[in-house]
Image (tube, rainbow, N blue to C red):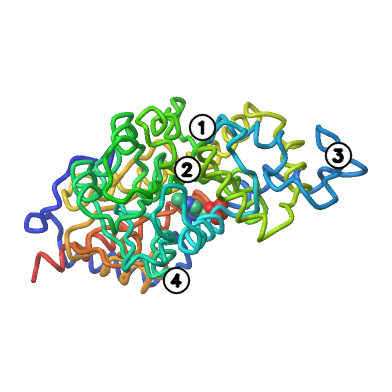
């Protein structure tokens, strides 16, 4: 969990006056709150930052750098100049980076569907012809990744995160022994929801580990590649370089998008990989589409200009996000810091704070919060099947509400944590 506040989560010793906290809770109920910390959506102010896009490319600007008429069909790989801009941030050479539709989740969905129906490079069989397909799922993780596995009947094997990526001893043992394991979800930077980033050692070992399945793939979802919250951006090791150096050039499928850079749902999604994998996907994409929305890609080119433009834009996002995260820490530190009943992350980027409460209390905290008008992500959502075996993890998403709303919502959350912990201890 990275930078966890080092507190115990021992429920037997909280210095909480149950009667007093019940009163606090009753007072909250009387406030008639209506607050929402559920999903990691950009706030309207963040979206405003990219309003320039709404009038681009504009006028009679529809020609790409090579003269391509972006109003017409074609250009399956996406605009070369947009691929150049995002090659650096996504750590994929532009020649191996495809700029495609509006959502990386769609790409992940389609890549799995293609792998089921068409042999990936190096595969002996299509995945649909395997008796069983399993994916490793670092937890806590992104619920929509798990939903994709469910949709395709792919079994999920949870593996713990350590603060610098997944527990590699566990991962290596599993993939070496079990050829049913064909994939692994990775959010390598400012992970959703733990906020952690994979260390160089983690990236190298994932790239190099022997796998029983010859067609094992890392689903490298670099959704938060440039979403820094500090002055010292995390520098991830390039997974494609590491895989190539380890002699496993086809191991990683890289995904990314501008969803939380420009306009969510109206951005551009990217797929990057080895030349062989990129050719494999392009061949299949050619059956799916005659080409992506190049006008949308062109306006992104005009808006950002270059990779520096993207990074400068992300600084503006940071200015809006930082006070919201600060509000989360301020309230948690003040209300729970001395009690030893909860711990939380202070991520260096991304969109989430992970809150750990005493075992058996997370669902109760979420229920109590809902009763007083504060919507939290369902407890367990960050685990396959929605099942947090310890019922102790809550994902907080402070990006969308105003700073004042984050304060008020977090105060309510803190009271709910105290109440749930004190009730559990009193049992
Ligand atoms: N991956 C992760 C890890 C995310 O957190 C999100 C957004 N919540 C996505 C993918 C979705 O990205 P897109 O909008 O490109 O589908």
Instruction: Confirm or deny contact between disc 4 and disc 2 (CB under 8 A).
Output: no
* Camera-nearest label, 1 or 2: 1
Q: Is residue 381 left or right of residue 75?
A: left
The residue that appears at 36% across and 67% down in the rendered structure is 378
Read off the residue under disc 4. 32
The residue to which callout 1 is attached is 91
Would residue 197 be found to the left or right of residue 88 on screen?
Answer: left
User: Can you identify the residue that label 2 sits on?
Assistant: 222
- Judged left or right of residue 10, residue 307 is right
Q: Nearer the viewer, residue 244 or 267?
A: 244
Q: Secondary structure at mark 3?
A: loop
Disc assigned to residue 63 = 3
The answer to whether residue 41 of the structure is visible from this angle is: no
Whether label 3 touches label 4, CB < 8 Å: no
* Residue 329 locus on image (x, y percent): 35, 43
Q: Quadrant of residue 287?
A: bottom right
Q: How many angstroms separate mark 1 from mark 4 (CA)?
A: 47 Å
**Element on which disc 4 rests:** loop
In the image shown, does 231 or 23 lie closer to the viewer?
Answer: 231
Q: Callout 4 environment at 10 Å: few (<14), some (14 to 19), or many (20+)?
A: few
Residue 383 lies, in percent from the top left, at: 31, 61
Q: CA distance from mark 3 to mark 2?
A: 30 Å
Q: Position of residue 375 (x, y in %)?
A: 42, 66
First of labels 3, 2 by sequence position: 3
- Vertical placement of 385 versus 309: above or below? below
């Amino acid at each position: 969990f990275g930078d966890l506040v080092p507190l115990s989560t021992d429920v037997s010793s909280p210095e909480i006056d149950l009667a007093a906290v019940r009163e606090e809770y009753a007072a909250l109920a009387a406030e008639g709150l209506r607050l929402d910390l559920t999903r990691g959506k950009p706030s309207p102010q963040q979206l405003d930052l990219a309003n320039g896009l709404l009038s681009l490319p504009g006028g009679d600007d529809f020609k790409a750098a090579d003269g391509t008429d972006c109003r017409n069909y074609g250009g399956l790989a996406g605009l070369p100049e947009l691929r150049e801009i995002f090659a650096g941030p996504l750590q994929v050479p532009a020649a191996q980076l495809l700029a495609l539709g509006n959502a990386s989740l769609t790409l992940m969905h389609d890549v799995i569907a293609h792998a089921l129906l068409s042999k990936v490079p190096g595969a002996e069989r299509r995945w649909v012809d395997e008796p069983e397909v399993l994916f490793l799922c670092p937890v806590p993780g992104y619920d929509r990744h798990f939903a994709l596995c469910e949709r395709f009947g792919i079994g999920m094997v949870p593996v713990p995160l350590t603060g610098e990526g997944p527990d590699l001893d566990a991962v290596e043992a599993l993939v070496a022994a079990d050829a049913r394991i064909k994939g692994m979800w990775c959010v390598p930077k400012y992970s959703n929801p733990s906020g952690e980033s994979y260390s160089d050692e983690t990236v190298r070992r994932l790239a190099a580990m022997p796998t029983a399945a010859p067609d094992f793939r890392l689903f490298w979802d670099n959704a938060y590649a440039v979403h820094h919250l500090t002055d010292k951006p995390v520098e991830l090791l390039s997974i494609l370089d590491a895989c190539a150096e380890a002699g496993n050039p086809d191991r990683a499928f890289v995904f990314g998008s501008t969803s939380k850079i420009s306009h969510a749902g109206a951005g551009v999604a990217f797929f990057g990989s080895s030349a062989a994998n990129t050719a494999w996907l392009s061949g299949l994409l050619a059956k799916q589409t005659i080409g992506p929305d190049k006008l949308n890609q062109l306006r992104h080119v005009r808006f950002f200009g270059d990779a520096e433009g993207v990074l400068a834009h992300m600084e503006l996002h940071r200015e809006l996000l930082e006070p919201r995260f600060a509000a989360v820490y301020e309230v948690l530190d003040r209300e729970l810091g001395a009690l030893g009943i909860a711990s939380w992350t202070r991520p260096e980027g991304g969109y989430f704070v992970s809150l750990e409460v005493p075992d058996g209390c997370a669902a109760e905290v979420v229920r109590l919060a809902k009763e007083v008008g504060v919507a939290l992500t369902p407890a367990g959502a960050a685990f396959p099947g929605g099942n947090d075996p310890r019922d102790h993890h809550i994902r907080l998403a402070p990006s969308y509400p105003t700073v004042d709303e984050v304060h008020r919502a977090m105060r309510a959350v803190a009271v709910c944590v105290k109440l749930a912990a004190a009730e559990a201890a009193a049992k």
